[in-house]
Image: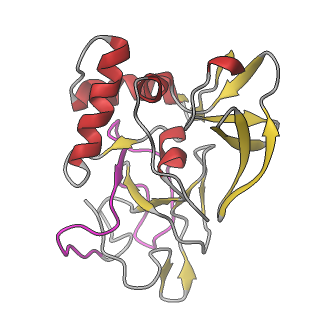
Amino acid sequence: MPVQRRRSSHYLRGMTLQNRVTPFNELVADPNRGMLMGNRGSLHDGDRNVVRWRSGKRWIICLVEFKDRRRTLMTPAQYTELFFLDEATALAAGHRPCAECRRERFNAYRAAIAGVHGALLSADQLDAQLDLERRVGNTQRRHRVPGAEVPDGAMVAVGDVAYLVLGRQLLAWTSSGYGDAISMPAGEVQLLTPPLTLNALRGGYVPVLSTR
């Protein structure tokens, strides 16, 4: 359920909220604006402090503006509004397109997976599979795959840096955009993007990328 932003969705009463998601699935306080919003349940307490990093299996990627809806960020007992640099970042963190505000993207994501996987999965099936692939307990799950097999739009980790795969090069992720390019390392790499979403990318799903 999107929120309509007036200035920056990361600010509230002079404070920067801990609601920005990195490709490593960290929730950080960052003043940079995000292109997309997300939801994975209620993660904050009554003082707008993040006290957990997940709640439930439904992790979605939303528009920041939809049908003039407005929300007060981190309202007690409501879901926590999260923000992403772009869609590739959100996908790497284990989210998938919202079936309401991004219905066309949700359908394209499902169809792309079906083209590779062979089955058109429901939202619940997508969420259950992604939950298995994106975490081990409370730790992000990493998958080792040959670098040559990673499609554009996925993200990998090299050391402590996340990189976007694009045109057989790796672009360094930062909270404000992508930095310098390096070549894909030989052999296997640590994949951040869950394998189910990797199938979507292989099937032709093209994530929306930051141009900053």
Residue shown at 63% from the left, 43% from the top: 24
Residue 209 percent location from the top left of the image:
52, 52
On screen, residue 169 above or below 68:
above
- Mark yes or no: residue 41 visible: no
Q: Is residue 84 magenta?
A: no
- Residue that sits furthest to the bottom in the current view: 14
Residue shown at 27% from the left, 23% from the top: 125
Q: Main secondary structure of the magenta part?
A: loop
105 vs 93, nearest the viewer: 105
179 vs 19, nearest the viewer: 179
On screen, residue 125 above or below 117:
below
Q: Which residues are magenta?
A: 42-71
Q: Is residue 58 magenta?
A: yes
Residue shown at 60% from the left, 45% from the top: 23
Quadrant in which the C terminus is drawn: bottom right
- Residue that sits furthest to the top in the current view: 118
Residue shown at 82% from the left, 19% from the top: 186
- Residue that sits furthest to the front in the current view: 167
35 vs 52, nearest the viewer: 35
Quadrant in which the N terminus is drawn: bottom left
Q: Give the quadrant of residue 120.
A: top left
On screen, residue 162 above or below 86:
above
18 vs 126, nearest the viewer: 126
Residue 22 percent location from the top left of the image:
60, 51
Residue 188 relative to residue 108: left or right: right
Q: Give the quadrant of residue 130.
A: top left
Residue 183 percent location from the top left of the image:
81, 34
Residue 52 percent location from the top left of the image:
49, 50
Residue 128 relative to residue 87: left or right: left
- Mark yes or no: residue 210 visible: yes
